[in-house]
Image (cartoon, helix red, strand yellow):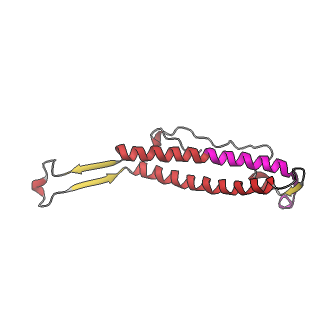
């Protein structure tokens, strides 16, 4: 396909602006996933454990040993893993854009650079047809939003 060979010209200044915008998007995602993680951790502390004390339930005569069962809420644990996964991804992407901001800050602003289509999309240049990061309320996560 020829589209992998196509080149588009952008100035270092426009790439700097695009990198800063992508950095800001990653910062918003980091905040979103941190808030989600903190909310889930709070829920786990408040309601995430189910404790059954069989000794207090009148079942002690059925067993020779005292028995207490503790279980985690699997939905909350799953949500915690999801938050950690996307938080890590956003932190890694933010580091990439810090590097690009440094690169383009040191380039003459009018310097023309040739980009391929994938690079144009990576920097978020041109008209976007996909929505930005959306955080709708998700009943499954007890009011904690998720990535669309």
Q: Position of residue 119 (x, y in %)?
A: 78, 56
Please, which residue is most extreme toward the front here? 106
Q: Quadrant of residue 107?
A: bottom right
Please, which residue is most extreme toward the left here? 61
Number of on-image labels: 0
Residue 57: in sight, yes or no? Answer: yes
Q: Position of residue 145 (x, y in %)?
A: 53, 41
Which quadrant: the C terminus? top right
Q: Residue at x 9, y 55 (%)?
A: 61
Q: Which residues are magenta?
A: 1-28
Work out whether residue 98 or residue 50 is closer to the camera in this orientation and state it. Answer: 98
Magenta part mainly helix, strand or loop?
helix
Q: Residue at x 11, y 56 (%)?
A: 62
Q: Residue at x 70, y 54 (%)?
A: 98
As drawn, is 14 to the left or to the right of 144?
right
Residue 124: in sight, yes or no? Answer: no
Is 7 covered by the magenta stretch? yes
């Amino acid at each position: 396909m020829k589209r992998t060979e196509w080149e588009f010209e952008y100035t270092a200044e426009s790439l700097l602006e695009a990198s800063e915008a992508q950095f800001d998007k990653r910062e918003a995602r980091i905040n979103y996933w941190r808030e989600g993680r903190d909310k889930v951790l709070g829920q786990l502390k408040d309601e995430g454990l189910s404790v059954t004390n069989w000794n207090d339930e009148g079942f002690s005569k059925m067993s020779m040993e005292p028995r207490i069962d503790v279980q985690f809420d699997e939905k909350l644990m799953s949500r915690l893993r999801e938050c950690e996964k996307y938080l890590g991804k956003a932190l890694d992407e933010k580091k990439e854009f810090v590097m690009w901001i440094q690169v383009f800050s040191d380039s003459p602003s009018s310097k023309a650079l040739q980009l391929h289509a994938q690079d144009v999309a990576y920097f978020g240049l041109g008209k976007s047809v996909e929505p930005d990061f959306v955080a709708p309320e998700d009943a499954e996560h007890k009011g904690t939003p998720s990535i669309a």
